[in-house]
Image: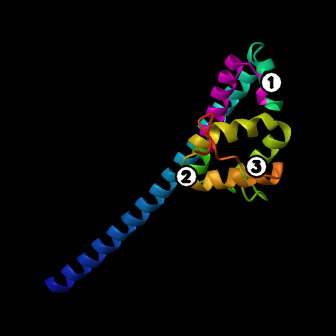
Amino acid sequence: MDWDQLATVAQLVTGAATLGVAVLLVSQLRQQHRDAEREILYTSQGRMQDLQRTIMTSHFGPIWARGSQDFDSLNEEEQQQFRALGYSMLTLQSVNAQSGHEGLDRGVASRIEAQTTGSYKQWPGIATYYERYGRSHTYNPELRSLLDAVFLREFGREVDTSWQWGVKETAS
């Protein structure tokens, strides 16, 4: 074998090795991406559990019980506390939507849609919070459309979009 043939074989081996390394790196990046997504979900679920523990305290539990059924039954201080919880819950929902974790549950086309439907059925005060406050800080247009559609389906009317950050704007 002369030097030209040896150089050609060496280049082929080097090319194959480079391709092998590239394939390995791509698979490692995919695995890291899956791990990062899983970590986001675990963190989000942990935060939601922390919020659930907040609901169970002797101080906030009664506020939650009343506000989740009828937001307007709360006094101003209680509404502020309820809004803080609602903001946190909707922010976590936004993180899940933004992270692309829709449809990860078998047989559920949209986890967020299913959770929101259940929430609005059990706790209509959450829907009142969404209409008056939460929609204003739901920046993802797809998520806002999904939540609006659930609202329409559950309450038989469109979300009143004249509410902005808890203030009902009047027509001029």
Which residue type carries mark 2? Arg
Which residue type carries mark 1? Ser
Q: In this view, does 19 lie to the left or right of 108?
A: left
Q: What numbered label is drawn on residue 112?
A: none
Q: Which residue is more in the foreground, 46 or 128?
A: 128
Query: Residue at label 1?
Result: 73
Q: How many marks?
A: 3
Q: How far apart are marks 3 and 1 (CA)?
A: 20 Å
| Label 2 packing within 10 angstroms: few (<14), some (14-19), many (20+) | few
Q: How far apart are marks 1 and 2 (CA)?
A: 44 Å
Q: List the single residue furthest toward the left.
A: 3
Q: List the single residue furthest toward the front.
A: 172
Write the residue at 79% across / 48% down: 117
As helix, strand or loop, the secondary structure at mark 2 comes to helix
Cβ–Cβ under 8 Å for marks 1 and 2 = no
Q: Distance between the residues labelled 3 and 2?
A: 33 Å
Residue 85 is covered by the magenta coloring: yes
Q: Give residue 1's quadrant in the image.
A: bottom left
Can residue 23 be seen by looking at this rendering?
yes
Characterize the magenta stretch by its predominant secondary structure: helix
Query: Residue at label 2?
Result: 34
Looking at the image, residue 7 lies above or below residue 44: below
Residue 120 picture location, percent across and down: 80, 42
Residue 69 picture location, percent across and down: 83, 31
Query: Residue at label 3?
Result: 151
Q: What stretch is highlighted in magenta?
A: 71-93
Q: Give residue 94's quadrant in the image.
A: top right
| Label 3 packing within 10 angstroms: few (<14), some (14-19), many (20+) | many
